[in-house]
Image (tube, helix red, strand yellow):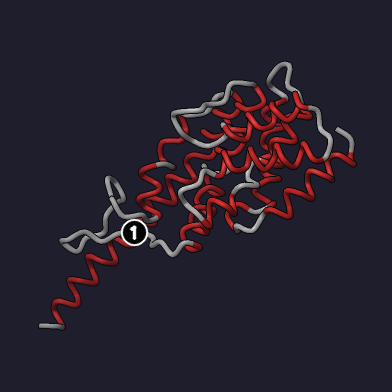
Amino acid sequence: MNKEIYSLIENYMISCMEDSAHDKEHVYRVLYNALAIAKTEKDVDYDVLIGACLLHDVGRKEQFENPKLCHAMVGGEKAEKFLGENGFAADYIVKVKHCIQTHRFRQSNQPQSIEAKILFDADKLDVVGAVGIARTLVYKGAVAEPLYSVCADGTVSDGEGDANPSFFQEYKYKLEHLYSKFYTKKGTQMAKERQQAAVDFYNSLYHEVQVSYKNGKDELGKIVE
């Protein structure tokens, strides 16, 4: 891929990025993670990989405006249209579209090509560890969701089994379980290296709010009768 083509795709990507948790810097981190993983794999088509990494989240705006939409599916369609209008080969477009439409964490429509598997892993690396925690908090703030839920008895829920969305609920439902979901050996290794930072943050935050509620309610009970 020459610089002119890279810049063409990059500029289109930048024009689509409006979500602070899925901004252009997220895209660059995914691209750089993907290149690190690709070095350990065979027969990687770097043109497909780079194009797919740059375009993988161009459907985020549509999903943010309508949560019923899947940004991966919308993004694949948008990428297909953009690449087609700019003269890219049909085979290239099909491969990039497959990568984009299979990069989301779900049971169906899983990645098949090595480029798609690398993109999947590279994107998930930006959800694990300290960066993943930070991005989740930014996103939760953007959609006005709380850090945690309070149980009927007044204690702080750890997020396990919560029906209402919160940071703790997201951690227990998704973030805690990502580390065994990677396709590549390198991606798995990189994820494991980041895991403890996320575990420590969650445990520290839960401990702090739990103690605050318990001690605070006890003290308040002594004063307010």
Q: Residue under circle 1?
A: 148
Vertical relation: 44 (above or below) 8: above
Vertical relation: 161 (above or below) 80: below
- Residue 97: x %, y % from top left: 66, 32
The residue lying at 68 percent from left, 51 percent from top is 25
* Quarter residue 49 falls in: top right
- Residue 3: x %, y % from top left: 89, 40
User: In this orientation, which residue lies closer to the viewer: 120 or 100?
Assistant: 100
Vertical relation: 45 (above or below) 170: above
- Residue 189: x %, y % from top left: 56, 28
SS under mark 1: loop
Q: Residue furthest left?
A: 225
Q: Is residue 127 left or right of residue 35?
A: left
**Mark 1, other Cα within 10 Å: few <14 / some 14–19 / many ≥20:** many
- Residue 34: x %, y % from top left: 68, 33
- The amino acid on which the numbered mark 1 sits, given as a three-letter code, is Tyr
For the N terminus, give its image quadrant: top right
The residue lying at 86 percent from left, 39 percent from top is 5
The residue lying at 28 percent from left, 50 percent from top is 162
User: In this orientation, which residue lies closer to the viewer: 39 or 96?
Assistant: 96
